[in-house]
């Protein structure tokens, strides 16, 4: 190559080099770091914030934007606004109404009687008023009222169960919201660490100290961290909406104030099971229903015993031209219909309710076993994260950062230590929420479902087929 062309090439290279140096000197170190490696690997786009397309829930007429709400405040809102609690109370009123109606005495009957009108051109032989009254025998009214009073007791126990369901659900969603709120703050730090790692990988690639695989892997890790943050944000929004539905007011813009941290408590399964089977409102309601079914059998056995129909009155006998009286007594004879079919149905209801109590006890034992395991798992994780894992990772991060300052540790190692610590902190917060959830359910008789309709005190198939309850 001629020397002239060589000189031109060197001059062109020098110009390009000086231009690149000038470009770098005209930028701050932060801007250089942000742009490092982008000519080789494009950094991933930031995903859309869910708030940009999330629908605003304006169905509630009550709003508490900008206010601090505690768990006590939320439970108070739920007590005032949750419709299932009103349903449960109205079912008590309904059963009390049945008890009142079932014990009322039959009304008397007043009749006017005229006989043989027009015979012989007269006004008739007899004209007068007759009063009749049914005398209820065998204590039927007392048995009927006692039966429905037991139903009312069952309704009261079910109302208590509904209060547990609503209160437990509010607590669970409250602690879940607090946990997600903390996880969002931690994941923001994870995103910063992932961004630092991506920038470091691109700078290393530009300097020939890393390959394209490292840069792309760091970009994937960054995007996953962002998606995890968005997923947690979506869950946080969902939890607040669910909480708003439970308490009957919009708490979307308020700040929840509470403590997620709690000390684990030692509990024994057999003690918990004994307390649950003794105090569970579901068991109490089922036992009240059983007593009601027992009274139903007695009531239906008394039904064939005939009531007495009394008639009495006075009138005028136009044939004899004098005032006369009328009296009569009647009763039904239980010859063919002795209520045998209804008695059999009542006995079947009683036997079925005995099996229902056994079913509830076995279900509670099973559910408590599951929740007890969940609580033990959560307590073990919370204890170990608090005592060992988080302190060790925190110390690891500190040591790696000091090692980097003394040029003994690579910067990537510092970022990995930081990521491990924040990731474990997210896991710890999640286990805290699980521990709180299990604690609430165990302490709250395993009841949840605060927007499920309140259970009726009268199960399907029981005898309520006549207008006047008996």
Image: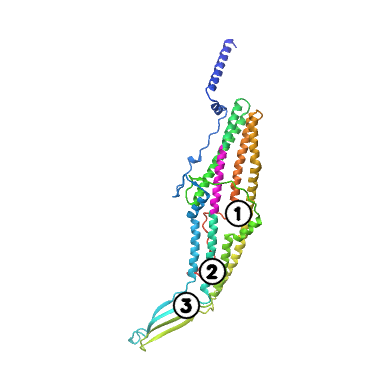
Residue ranking furthest to the bottom = 320
Instruction: Farthest residue to the left: give it.
Output: 121
Q: Secondary structure at mark 1?
A: helix
Q: Earlier in the sequence, mark 1 or mark 2?
A: 2
- Along the line of sight, the residue nearer the viewer: 386 or 363: 386
Query: With respect to residue 65, does 319 lie above or below?
Result: below
Give the mark count: 3
Instruction: Name the spot of residue 203 as percent of width and height, x first.
Output: 59, 27
Closer to the eye: label 2 or 3: 2
Say whether marks 1 and 2 touch (CB < 8 Å).
no
Neighbourhood count class around disc 2 (C-alpha, 10 Å): few under 14, some 14–19, many 20 upward? many
Does the rendering let one see residue 237? Answer: yes
Q: Residue 416 location, x and y as percent?
A: 63, 35
Label number found at residue 442: 1
Q: Closer to the camera, 214 or 185?
A: 185
Q: Main secondary structure of the magenta part?
A: helix
Crowdedness near tag 1: few (<14), some (14–19) or many (≥20) residues, C-alpha within 10 Å: many
Q: Nearer the viewer, mark 1 or mark 2?
A: 1
Q: In the image, residue 435 lies at what x, y percent?
A: 61, 48
The Cα atoms of the two marked residues, 3 and 1, are separated by 54 Å
Q: Which residue is mark 2?
A: 147
Q: Reading the chain from its start, which is encountered first: label 2 or label 3? A: 3
Marking on residue 134: 3
Residue 152: give x, y in percent of width and height: 52, 65
Magenta residues, as a range? 167-188
Depicted 65 relative to depicted 28: above or below: below
* Residue at 59%, 44% in the rendered image: 429
Few, some or many residues within 10 Å of mark 3 (<14, 14–19, 20+) = some
């Amino acid at each position: 190559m001629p020397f002239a062309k060589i000189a031109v090439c060197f001059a062109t290279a020098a110009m390009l080099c000086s231009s690149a140096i000038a470009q770098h000197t005209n930028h701050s170190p932060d801007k250089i770091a942000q742009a490092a490696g982008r000519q080789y690997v494009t950094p991933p786009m930031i995903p859309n914030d869910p708030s940009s397309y999330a629908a605003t829930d304006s169905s509630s007429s009550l709003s508490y934007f900008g206010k601090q709400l505690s768990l006590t405040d939320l439970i108070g809102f739920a007590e005032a606004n949750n419709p299932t609690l009103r349903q449960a109370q109205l079912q008590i009123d309904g059963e009390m109404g049945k008890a009142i109606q079932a014990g009322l005495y039959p009304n008397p009957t007043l009749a006017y009687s005229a006989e043989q009108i027009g015979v012989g051109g007269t006004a008739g032989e007899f004209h007068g008023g007759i009063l009749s009254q049914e005398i209820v025998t065998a204590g039927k009214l007392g048995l009927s009222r006692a039966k429905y009073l037991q139903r009312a007791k069952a309704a009261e126990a079910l109302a208590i169960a509904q209060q547990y369901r609503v209160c437990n659900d509010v607590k669970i969603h409250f602690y879940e919201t607090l946990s997600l709120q903390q996880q969002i703050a931690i994941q923001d730090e994870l995103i910063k660490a992932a961004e630092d790692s991506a920038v470091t990988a691109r700078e290393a690639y530009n300097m020939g100290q890393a390959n394209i695989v490292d840069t792309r892997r760091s970009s994937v890790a960054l995007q996953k961290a962002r998606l995890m943050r968005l997923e947690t944000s979506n869950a946080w929004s969902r939890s607040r909406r669910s909480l708003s539905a439970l308490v009957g007011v919009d708490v979307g813009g308020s700040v929840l104030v509470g403590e997620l941290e709690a000390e684990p408590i030692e509990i024994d399964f057999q003690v918990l099971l004994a307390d649950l089977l003794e105090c569970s409102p579901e068991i109490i309601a089922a036992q009240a229903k059983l007593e009601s079914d027992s009274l139903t059998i007695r009531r239906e056995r008394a039904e064939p015993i005939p009531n007495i129909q009394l008639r009495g009155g006075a009138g005028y006998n136009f044939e004899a031209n004098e005032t006369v009286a009328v009296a009569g007594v009647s009763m039904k004879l239980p010859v063919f219909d002795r209520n045998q079919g209804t008695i059999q149905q009542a006995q079947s209801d009683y036997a079925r309710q005995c099996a229902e109590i056994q079913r509830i006890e076995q279900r509670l034992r099973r559910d408590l076993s599951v929740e007890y395991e969940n609580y033990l798992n959560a307590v073990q994780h919370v204890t170990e994260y608090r005592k060992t894992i988080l302190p060790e990772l925190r110390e690891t991060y500190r040591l790696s950062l000091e090692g980097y300052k003394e040029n003994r540790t690579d910067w990537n190692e510092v970022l990995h230590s930081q990521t491990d610590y924040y990731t474990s902190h997210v896991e710890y917060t999640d286990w805290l929420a699980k521990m709180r959830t299990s604690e609430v359910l165990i302490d709250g008789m395993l009841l949840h479902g605060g927007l499920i309709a309140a259970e009726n005190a009268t199960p399907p198939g029981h005898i309520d087929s006549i207008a006047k309850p008996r």
